[in-house]
Image (cartoon, helix red, strand yellow):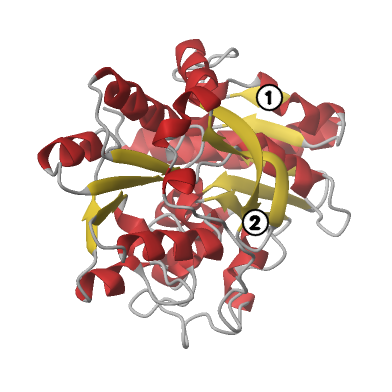
Amino acid sequence: MPQVGDLRAKMSSLLEALNKWLCGPITVMEVCGTHTVSIFRSGIRTMLPKDVRLLSGPGCPVCVTDQAEVDAMVSLAKKPGVVLATYGDMVRVPGSCGSLAEARSCGAEVAVVGSAIQALALAESMQDKEVVFAGIGFETTAPATAVLLREARRKNVKNLSVLSLHKLVPPVLRLLASDPTLVIDGFLLPGHVSTIIGTAPYAFLAEEYGKACAVAGFEPLDIMAGIVEIARQICGGRPAVRCLYGRVVRHEGNVKAQELLGEVFRPASVRWRGIGVVEASGLVLADDYSDFDAYSRFGITLEEVNPPAGCRCGDVLAGRIAPLECPLFGGSCTPQFPVGPCMVSSEGSCSAYYKYSSKGVSPWGA
């Protein structure tokens, strides 16, 4: 295990390299919520030169779940005979008529699962109920939902369905990169998602939009190396997609997982919270798995729903504002009493700002 002194020395070297390659002010979006939290937790924000601006992006799966999708989950949970299963952070996100937690307190059956396959065990143990798994997340978690459906088919489980709310990262990055109102010079790309899709799907960011890109891991040195690489590309005028997470990410990604996704899902245009409908940015069940589709089994349609008054989670996710610029931040919206999902999720940027932004001391001695 590296010694603390060695880590500090490496961080100092990276900071020196960053100052060397910094030719002017740059804005970098860290796409992934795990990056956001790691950046705060490690104190990286406090040690960056003032000319490096970090923006949090749409990489928190709970945060990008649209208000209408939350409402659909709550509505399903309230149906007699239905058990709604989903991941823990989703339970406290407020919908138009309350959260899943509030619905559960009024008698709705809501189950928190740590993995998608647990929904299958629930369905097998509760054969007098309809179990609906609300699958959220990006390319990282969608393969687990696909495995769940394969297993349900193999075991001929009939009382299980999936409300697929999965979303795809490259399409929303295209939307952000093409937005002339946003000034983003580079993207710190998500390590987890890249493990599945590889690096090729990001090529358009450099080739069509001239954005510098680095795939990075989640340790502080990984993140700082990614920022240095982005600065180097910008200063050199040679935007590209570089992978600095080679111990996990391969250029072609996880081909087996991609084949599984292609078997169980098909792309569809879906709505992202505060961002709107993004073409081909979601995953719905393929025709061969339509008998497991909760939308058709329960007649669910998603209508556009306004977010809570004053909530600017959508602008935070799109990088239009920082969390501190939301008028509700820290006042009527706190982790204890969240108004929007960015304050609920453990990967939410508002939650990270609230938890860490007052600690402005770098532990790296830089």
Kind of element beneath mark 2: strand
Residue identifier under label 1: 201
Q: Is residue 123 left or right of residue 297?
A: left
Q: CA distance from mark 1 to mark 2?
A: 22 Å
Q: Amino acid at mark 1?
A: Pro
Relative vertical location of residue 126 with respect to residue 354 in this rendering, above or below: above
Can you say whether 150 is above or below 336 in the image? above
Residue occupying the point 64% across, 56% down: 55
- What kind of residue is marked 2? Leu
Q: Nearer the viewer, residue 215 or 312?
A: 312
- Image mark count: 2
Left/right placement of residue 251 relative to residue 156 reads right
The one nearer the camera, 260 or 42, is 260
Q: Earlier in the sequence, mark 1 or mark 2?
A: 2
* Quarter of the figure with residue 327: bottom right
> Residue 325, percent across and down?
64, 77
Name the residue that disc number 2 marks: 55
Where's residue 229, x and y in %? 67, 32
Farthest-out residue, bottom: 331
Image coordinates of residue 265 in percent, x first then y, are 53, 28
Looking at the rendering, which quadrant does residue 291 occupy? top left
Q: Is residue 115 left or right of residue 342?
A: left
Tell which tag, 1 or 2, sits nearer the viewer.
Answer: 1
Judged from this view, the residue extending furthest toward the left is: 125
Describe the element under mark 1 as helix, strand or loop: helix
Residues under numbered marks 1 and 2 in contact, where contact means CB atoms less than 8 Å apart: no
Identified at 10% across, 40% down, the residue is 125
Name the residue at 54% across, 83% down: 328
Classed neighbour count for the residue bearing mark 2: other residues with Cα under 10 Å, few (<14), some (14–19), many (≥20): many
